[in-house]
Amino acid sequence: MNGCTYAEMAAIFLGIEPGAVHGRRSKGDAPIPAIFSFVGRVLHHLSIYAGALLVILEESDLLNGQLGEMPLLPLCIRNGCCSRDSLAWFRYGYRNRIAAHEFALTFPIPEEIKDDNEVKIWVTQRRKEWLDVEVTDQEPIVLRSIRAIMIY
């Protein structure tokens, strides 16, 4: 799901050409309702299973206390994020999966920031600083669009 749109995910999931995915209304048998069903049913359950796996690993100490970013796995799956950065931007920056991936690429969180509260402070501060500067042509179109939504 790594920042893909629902249309791109539907094309991959159903094995069809991206041009065959449309946003018109349907009886539920079109590609977009199918991918919503997949995300809602399958990925939701995967996030629950990932949480259970995490509990098992923590309790059994199979990883000798070295869980790293593993505790983020259930939330990443549930929210369609692929990293600590995209999840942090989704949770604290702008609650949109595609925008979160773009923010994570543009403003990666420094490795030395580990604590979740510090991550939250860093992301909200970056977002404020980003909104305070003038938009440039080099800024990704997704971020320009998000800026327009947040400002107006």
Image (cartoon, rainbow, N blue to C red):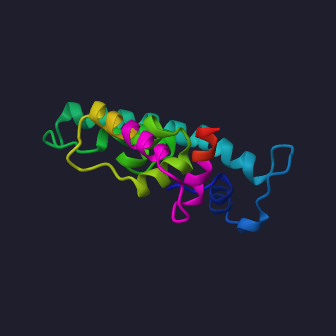
Q: Does the magenta stretch include residue 131?
A: yes
Q: Position of residue 37 (x, y in %)?
A: 67, 42
Q: Give the range drawn in magenta.
A: 124-146
Q: Quick check: can you spot residue 50?
A: no
Q: Nearer the viewer, residue 41 or 149?
A: 149
User: Eyeballing the image, is 17 above or below 127?
Assistant: below
Q: Position of residue 46 (x, y in %)?
A: 48, 41
Q: Nearer the viewer, residue 53 or 118?
A: 118
- Dominant secondary-structure state across the stretch colored magenta: helix
Q: Is residue 4 magenta?
A: no
Q: Quick check: can you spot residue 139?
A: yes
Residue 152 found in image quarter: top right
Specify whether 10 is left or right of 55.
right
Instruction: Pick out the residue farthest to the left.
Output: 64
Q: Which residue is drawn at 54% across and 46% down?
A: 97
Q: Residue at x 55, y 52 (%)?
A: 143
Residue 8 found in image quarter: bottom right
Specify whether 8 is left or right of 23.
left
Q: Which of 109 and 6 is in front in this view?
A: 109
Q: Which residue is drawn at 43% across and 35% down?
A: 92
Q: Position of residue 114 (x, y in %)?
A: 23, 40
Q: Position of residue 35 (x, y in %)?
A: 67, 49
User: Eyeballing the image, is 2 above or below 151?
Assistant: below
Report how many numbered discs are placed on residues in the image: 0
